[in-house]
Image: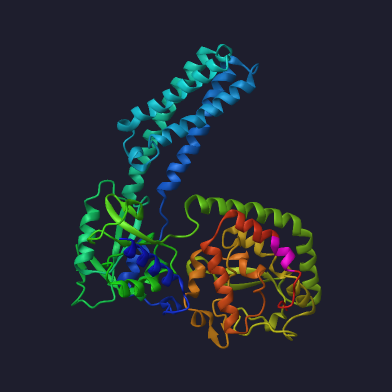
Amino acid sequence: MNEIDHRLRYTSQKVRNYQTGEDPSAHETELNPLVERIAAEFDDNTISPVMVSGLLRIGEFFGLAAIGLGIMAAYVGFNMIVPYLLTTFGGSLLFVVLNEIGAGYTIRALRRPLKRFPRVVLAWSGTFALLAVAGFLMKISEDFSRVWGGSWFVGGLAFLLLTRIVLSWRIRKWARDGAMERRAVIVGGGKPAEKLIRALELQHDNDIRICGIFDDRDDARSPPIVAGYPKLGNIAELVSFTRRAHIDMLIVSLPLDAEDRVLTMLKKLWILPVDIRLSAHSNKLRFRPRTYSFIGSVPMLDIFDRPIRDWDSVAKRAFDIFFSLLGIAVFSPVMLATAIAIKLDSKGPVIFKQKRHGFNNEQINVFKFRSMYVEQCDPTARAQVTKDDPRVTRVGRFIRKTSLDELPQFFNSLRGELSLVGPRPHAVTAQSSDRLYADVVDGYFARHRVKPGVTGWAQINGWRGEIDTDEKIRRRTEFDLYYIENWSLWFDLKILFLTPIRLLNTDNAY
């Protein structure tokens, strides 16, 4: 048992070693028209159940508090506002905690509001019981109005019931429309895939939607139709399909003893911003329960998780908006002065737009202050800027040296195309020694599992400026992948505040 567990961890670690193996995303594979149409059907975003239940927690907390305070204002007045404020907010928070303990925020509970409502009543009653005990022990219960307490209890129950009935209706509608589902692709066909699909179909409240099957084997070894689902292509085509469609999960349906084949597939797939699970449904080996994640009762082994998801993505977006607005406010005089200097120094537009790779390899327009003569600008970045490059203007040399040319990217971050902190975006045709970066570094596109950033971990560790050797792009990619694997808001904050200090070293900036 421990030996197999160790082998799984070893396999996962080998996959992360992107120095070996072939990266099929280095050259996007064209999809046939049928598969392209199927991918287009899944082009819209889905609604995360984690976000729905999280927003319900927040909504119920503030809704209950608002009802309590509204009744206080109408009946009691504002003579004892502090005790009532503490009680209403404390009681609202206590209900959310008790309801969480009672599994009242699971999607299964929200689908059946009337059946599960007795548990909600119990949590709300428990909240008042605990408040009453606290008031008795603190000898302050007589200070509170009984009418207020009773009205808040009844009004809160009505609010909770109405909220859950409406949300249940919305969840059913989202489920019918395909908006609340996890879109999955089966990797590997044949009998193992058929058994897995049948098992998933038997699960109650299953939110998995199988979008197709991909397998490198030919039709003789892997049938074109498995359990009613078509085989859409091979693994290289799966990478292109996943990038075009909004796929949430790849489920590898291969036996654990086929380690070499599993490893080969995972080395091709880990660059994608999706969850990757290894099906353990038909495997005779059984590990400790905490080893698995489950879809219903179907066991899965977690190989890779999509980075920066759900509430983490909300927190990071809020971080970007706040500090982008702050940066624009603080640096607006500098940006205005830079724009005037560029306009006086050479003819042409002040802002230069360059196509670069964004999240999930999507192409975005990144803003920079123009630092080259307009007739010699290179939007493709095929020829990198070198020391004393004659294409760079006088003002351009200064703003590139000081990184002032990057300031317009605060607007990219505000628009959501960039994050403030992340792997730096490279031009789509950027090269090192006449080779595209993806041809130099296997696993290069794994950098795009998160939004690129205005600044990043590689930049504050000295890997900024010209990339004129293969080693420089390898090292930059290594630092970018470390950032993705170890992301936190504190890590972002550290990078953000270290950036101006590290920019004082201008040896590689020209």
Q: Can residue 198 be seen in this view?
A: yes
Residue 363 placement (x, y as % from top left): 52, 70
Instruction: Point out the image quarter for the C terminus.
Output: bottom right
Q: Which residue is the extreme one toward the top?
A: 142
Q: Going by the image, does 52 lie left or right of 506?
A: left
Say which residue appears at 30% left-offset and 73% top-offset.
233
Q: In this view, does 271 lie above or below 180?
A: below
Q: Can residue 234 be seen in this view?
A: no
- Taking the magenta stretch, the answer to whether it contains residue 238 is no
Residue 307 placement (x, y as % from top left): 48, 60
Q: Going by the image, does 159 lie left or right of 341?
A: left
Say which residue appears at 43% left-offset and 60% top-offset.
305
Residue 344 placement (x, y as % from top left): 81, 73
Q: Nearer the viewer, residue 105 or 457?
A: 457
Give the image quarter of residue 483. Answer: bottom right
Q: Is the magenta stretch mostly helix, strand or loop?
A: helix
Q: Which of 103 and 383 is in front in this view?
A: 103
The span picked out in magenta is 498-503
Q: Is residue 500 above or below residue 135?
A: below
Q: Which of 171 and 22 is in front in this view?
A: 22
Q: Going by the image, does 82 lie left or right of 109?
A: right
Q: Going by the image, does 339 lie left or right of 288?
A: right
